[in-house]
Image (tube, rainbow, N blue to C red):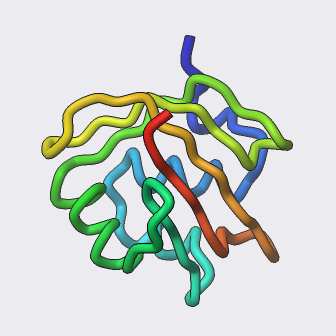
């Protein structure tokens, strides 16, 4: 059973997932610190390029299955038009109510 985005316990992660699922570039950017970083499958990526390819232009969607570490770690089904549906892990670093870094990869 999935956890609705609006029920996620960490407010910054909740804003991130809500913006991602709404395909809302402005809200997604607002959920991140201006100098936020990320990695995918252990490799650092350009966040702007990655989010455009993996979220916005490919209709990314995250269905959260579980959260741990006070809401900073998620197990989710992630789907987009490029890769289809897969089980993924997400780890967030949050400061001052915004995501400063996230790490994702296949679970």
Please identify the quarter of the rendering in which residue 50 is found: bottom left
In the image, residue 27 lies at what x, y percent?
A: 47, 67
**Residue 94 location, x and y as percent?**
75, 67
41 relative to 11 in the view: left or right: left
Residue drawn 41% across the image and 53% down it: 20
Q: Which quarter of the rendered picture does the N terminus lie within?
A: top right
* 60 lies above or below 57: above
Q: Between residue 14 and residue 70, name the one nearer to us.
A: 70
Residue farthest to the right? 70
- Relative to 7, residue 81 above or below: below
Across and down, in percent, residue 107 comes to 50, 33
Instruction: Tell me: residue 18, above or below residue 102.
Output: above
Please, is residue 69 above or below residue 102 in the view?
A: above
The residue sitting at 29% across, 46% down in the picture is: 60
Count of numbered tags: 0
Residue drawn at x 56%, y 88% is 34
Quadrant in the picture for residue 66: top right
Q: Is residue 44 left or right of residue 70?
A: left
Classify residue 79 as left or right of residue 5: left
């Amino acid at each position: 059973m999935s956890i609705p985005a609006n029920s996620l316990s960490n407010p910054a992660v909740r804003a991130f997932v809500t913006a991602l699922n709404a395909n809302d570039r402005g809200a997604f950017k607002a959920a991140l610190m201006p100098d936020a970083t990320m990695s995918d499958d252990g490799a650092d990526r350009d966040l702007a390029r990655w989010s455009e390819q993996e979220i916005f232009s490919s209709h990314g969607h995250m269905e959260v299955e579980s959260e741990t570490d006070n809401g900073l770690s998620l197990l989710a089904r992630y789907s987009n038009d490029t890769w289809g549906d897969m089980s993924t892990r997400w780890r967030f670093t949050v400061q001052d109510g915004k995501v400063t870094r996230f790490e994702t990869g296949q679970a």
